[in-house]
Image (cartoon, rainbow, N blue to C red):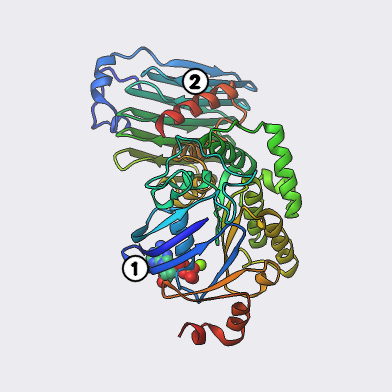
């Protein structure tokens, strides 16, 4: 994350990136640093709506809780990169939605390190992609040797609205402890034709029917988020542009 | 109300309907019976405009407001407005096959699905309210307020003895077979169509639910300005919703038509005899 020469496609974490945009933005400012003290509680909502590369390094102290909610929707290239370290018994939640149309390239890249025992991380990521847009999730969960009783989950789904859109999803585990629970699920699909027809048969125009199904697809990600209503409204408006 | 002439349709390039003709007037209830695979569901999907069901020949004209013996539709007439798409049709008569599925719904067509679809994450009442208001908008009517809509939904749920809580749940998710069929009828009650095509609405119903659904169909649809096409495999629903006409569909065509007695005859003698 702190490389001095700008990355190329050969770098795993930048494999699907818009390298021209990255080069233009190089050198990147130092990552934002967030330290959640032991026993602390942290919540933050991030809306990426202008085409930026946003890097965050976060350390979650013993027994602390942190929740990040991300809506990645804007600009030709929007990247959110997280490096999260969990200390003993810490709890991390990521709820992210990326919605892209046209030829947008949006990505969320995470490294979640369980450095100490008994921490919990849960990542839920939903991407909706239309046009020739690309949406990427690269998520590494690293569990240190003595981080027993780690509980981690990656729940990643993408919905493609057309044949020309692309979704990349790569959850990755690097586990050095033996008593861990690491779940990951990954699915890329398209809107269910029968559901769409059922809704239209009741009188909903195609765009409205699609919007309702997409709203259901991203529903729940922002539950309990800081600024939940705003995130939901912005997501819905962006979905409306896509259908 | 509905005039189907020489309808041919294919699914995945396979001819299923092969010259089907049928005329239904306002005030009438028609039943279509026939063996499995005859093309009954295909007919309902073709009329409902489901993608993949391709019409290769024939026509379907839909006149939601035409009532025999009356010069113009009664009080309940659907005002479709001058901007409503009519295909090659006229003011009174729509070229049904030229309309998209949602336009057919706004014109007063309702399709009761043989297998109602489960849609996780989408609440019944939310989608129904949006559907009803989309129909009203297409017809140039004002939307129904949230309060008025809930009142309407509660009334129809009561009629079909479906718990209002179920209506707030995601569409058909976790519903039993019978609850799904009752939910279809609640939707029909709320949307208040002119023509309902009900595909095996009786399957999956126990005897009590059958009576409730039968009463519901009669209450909602048995009116001089409405019509029903009941697709069914068995005689038993017809004990509750008495048809004026019964047709036998076999190998993609109507092979025999008659009055209610034809259903009893079919029950007694089986399709093979009649369709032969
Ligand atoms: N999606 C489909 N793809 C291919 N064949 C189909 C499809 N749907 C129906 N069929 C075929 O069409 C014929 C009629 O089916 P259907 O209309 O469902 O009959 P029914 O409702 O009278 O039992 C059957 O032979 C069936 O196999
Ligand atoms: Mg069938």
Choose between B263 and B64: the one closer to the eye: B64
Give me the residue at 53% from left, 55% from top: B1
Kind of element beneath mark 1 = strand
- In the rendered image, the quadrant that contains the N terminus of chain A is top left
- The quarter of the picture where residue B236 lies is bottom right
The disc placed on residue B15 is 1
Q: Is residue B83 above or below residue B86?
A: above
Q: Left or right: where does residue A236 sit relative to residue B227? A: left
Subunit under mark 1:
B
Q: Is residue B2 above or below residue B140?
A: below
- The quarter of the picture where residue A221 lies is top right
The disc placed on residue A46 is 2
Q: Nearer the viewer, mark 1 or mark 2?
A: 1
Subunit under mark 2:
A
Q: Position of residue B226 (x, y in %)?
A: 61, 54
Choose between B188 and B81: the one closer to the eye: B81
* Label 1 beta carbon within 8 A of ligand 1: no
Between the C-alphas of marks 1 and 2, the distance is 54 Å
- In the rendered image, the quadrant that contains the C terminus of chain A is top left
Q: Position of residue B215 (x, y in %)?
A: 73, 61
Visible residue check, residue B74: yes
* Label 2 beta carbon within 8 A of ligand 1: no
Q: Quadrant of ligand 1?
A: bottom left
Q: Estimate how packed mark 1 is, as few (under 14), some (14 to 19) or many (20 or more) residues with alpha carbons within 10 Å.
A: some
Q: Is residue B3 above or below residue B130?
A: below
């Amino acid at each position: 994350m702190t490389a001095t020469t700008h990355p190329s496609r050969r770098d795993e974490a930048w494999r699907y990136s818009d390298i021209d945009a990255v080069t233009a933005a190089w050198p990147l400012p130092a990552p934002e640093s967030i330290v959640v003290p032991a026993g602390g509680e942290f919540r933050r909502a991030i809306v990426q709506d202008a085409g930026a590369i946003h890097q965050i390094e976060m350390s979650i102290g013993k027994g602390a809780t942190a929740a990040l909610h991300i809506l990645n929707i804007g600009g030709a290239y929007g990247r959110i990169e997280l490096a999260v370290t969990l200390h003993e018994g810490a709890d991390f939640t990521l709820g992210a939605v990326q919605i892209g149309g046209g030829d947008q390239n949006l990505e969320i890249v995470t490294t979640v390190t369980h450095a100490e025992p008994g921490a919990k991380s849960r990542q839920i990521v939903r991407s909706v992609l239309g046009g020739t847009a690309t949406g990427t999730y690269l998520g590494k969960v690293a569990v240190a040797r003595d981080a027993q009783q780690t509980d981690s989950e990656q729940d990643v789904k993408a919905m493609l609205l057309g044949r020309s859109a692309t979704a990349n999803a790569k959850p990755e585990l690097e586990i050095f402890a033996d008593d861990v629970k690491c779940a990951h699920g990954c699915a890329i699909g398209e809107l269910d034709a029968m559901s769409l027809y059922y809704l239209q048969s009741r009188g909903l125009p195609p765009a409205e029917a699609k919007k309702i199904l997409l709203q259901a697809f991203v529903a729940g990600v922002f539950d309990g988020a800081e600024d939940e209503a705003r995130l939901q409204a912005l997501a819905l408006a962006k979905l409306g542009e896509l259908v | 109300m509905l005039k189907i002439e020489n309808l041919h349709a294919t699914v995945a390039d396979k001819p299923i309907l092969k010259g089907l003709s049928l005329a239904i007037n306002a005030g009438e209830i028609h039943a279509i019976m026939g063996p499995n695979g005859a093309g009954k569901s295909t007919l309902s999907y073709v009329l409902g405009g489901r993608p993949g069901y391709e019409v290769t020949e024939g026509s379907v004209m839909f006149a939601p407001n035409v009532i025999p013996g009356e010069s113009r539709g009664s009080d309940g007439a659907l005002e479709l407005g001058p901007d409503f798409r009519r295909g090659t049709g006229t003011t009174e008569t729509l070229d049904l096959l030229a309309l998209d599925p949602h336009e057919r719904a706004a014109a007063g067509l309702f399709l009761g699905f043989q297998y109602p679809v489960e849609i996780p994450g989408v609440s019944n009442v939310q989608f129904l309210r949006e559907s009803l208001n989309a129909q009203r908008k297409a017809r140039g009517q004002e939307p129904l307020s949230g309060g008025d809509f809930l009142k309407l939904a509660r009334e129809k749920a009561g009629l079909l003895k479906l718990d209002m809580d179920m209506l707030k749940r995601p569409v058909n998710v976790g519903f039993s077979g019978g609850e799904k069929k009752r939910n279809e009828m609640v939707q029909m009650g709320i949307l208040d169509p002119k023509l309902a095509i009900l595909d095996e609405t009786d399957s999956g119903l126990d005897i009590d639910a059958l009576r409730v659904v039968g009463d519901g169909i009669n209450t909602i649809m048995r009116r001089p300005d409405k019509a029903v096409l009941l697709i069914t495999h068995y005689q038993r629903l017809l004990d509750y919703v008495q048809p004026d006409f019964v047709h036998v569909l076999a190998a993609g065509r109507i092979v025999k038509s008659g009055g209610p007695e034809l259903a009893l005859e079919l029950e007694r003698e089986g399709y093979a005899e009649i369709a032969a």
